[in-house]
Amino acid sequence: MRYFLIIICVIASCFFIACSGTISYPDWYLKSQSDSRYLYGVGEADSLQDAKLAALNDLASKISLNIESNINIQKEQIDSKVTSKINNNVGINVSDIELDSVEHPIIEEIDGLFFVQARVEKVKIINKLNSDIDSSAIKINSILSDIKNSKCSTMSPKHREKLLELLALSDYKSQQISSLNGVVRQKQLLDNVANMLLHPPRAYYISFAKGGNSNDYKLVDNALMNEYNKFFSISSKDSDIYYIENRYDIHKTNTQVTIALDSSIKDCNDNVVFNTTLEVVQDVKDKSIAIAINRLKAQLYKKIYSWIE
């Protein structure tokens, strides 16, 4: 009998502990709230301030989920780098929501826990996102003006890189606006830029070489051409496009292969916009010229990319 009472007490204690650890949620907290005017979020915490912040984060995540389920950006329409940036930035930040526009229609405290419902008018978020896009549009128009004033029939890789970044930022905010059934004020401009970026910068390419032999020239030239092809569409000579000039010297001894390169890019106004001098020295062994070329083109790529950024 004594053991039986002990067992009963232990069971009762466990039941008591289990019950005391159960959170009692308000009915409204567990129900999904939605309407055409507001975006809602809920949060709970030990303090009212933390509960409000949790509700705000929940509210912001609702837009993220909407976009992730609806986003449909075609890689063939926009550079893959832009697509990657957009996908990495999908969602809305709490900073995109004006804190003074957030309402807390329901606040409830149960057993020391605060439960909060937050809401914000969708139109206020849409206006904030459109304002952000407007700021990017000012920078985009400035770049487009630079391209026009250059008198060149093509943009430069630097222009392209900046436009890609601005388009990425603006496009994912456009997706957020669309998920809220809003209208993007700068849609026409963004569409025009996306179409422009379908056409990479164009350039005419020429090389001057000395030393080595014809086979060496071909190997070096193909390697350099491949690197420049990552930033330009190489085309026939035209006074309205960019001009790439390479001068390289191949020097071989019994022990070493040396390739010295002077590479420059001019715009259509004959202004030098990029110039670099490189040299690689490779000990003679099997495929030493190929190794030297690989080192040279890797260095050239880094130099061009640094210039673009």
Image (cartoon, rainbow, N blue to C red):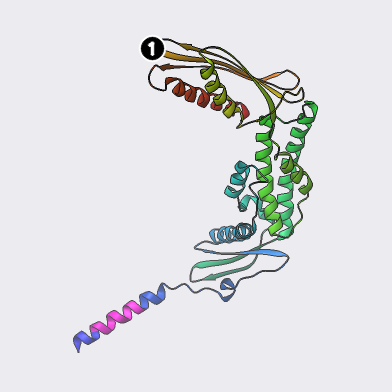
User: What's under tag 1, amino acid-wise?
Assistant: Thr
Viewer-closest of 277 and 56: 277
- Magenta residues? 6-15
Viewer-closest of 43 and 169: 169
Image quadrant for the C terminus? Answer: top right
Q: Which residue has dot 1 on it?
A: 255
> Residue 74: where, in percent of width, then height?
65, 50
Q: Is residue 159 left or right of residue 303?
A: right
Q: Is residue 272 left or right of residue 210?
A: right
Image quadrant for the N terminus? Answer: bottom left
Is residue 71 visible to the viewer in this orientation of the structure? yes
Question: Most extreme residue toward the left, as rendered?
Answer: 2
Give the quarter of the image for residue 182. Answer: bottom right
> Residue 239: where, in percent of width, then height?
76, 22
Q: Residue at x 76, y 38 (%)?
A: 138
Q: Is residue 285 left or right of residue 4?
A: right
Q: Residue at x 71, y 57 (%)?
A: 178
Magenta stretch: includes residue 14: yes
Residue 84 in the image: above or below residue 114:
above
Magenta stretch: includes residue 228: no
Tell me the chief SS of the magenta region. helix
Is residue 303 visible to the viewer in this orientation of the structure? no
Report the number of discs: 1
> Residue 161: where, in percent of width, then height?
65, 35
Viewer-closest of 33 and 68: 68
> Residue 59: where, in percent of width, then height?
61, 60
Residue 109 in the image: above or below residue 91:
below
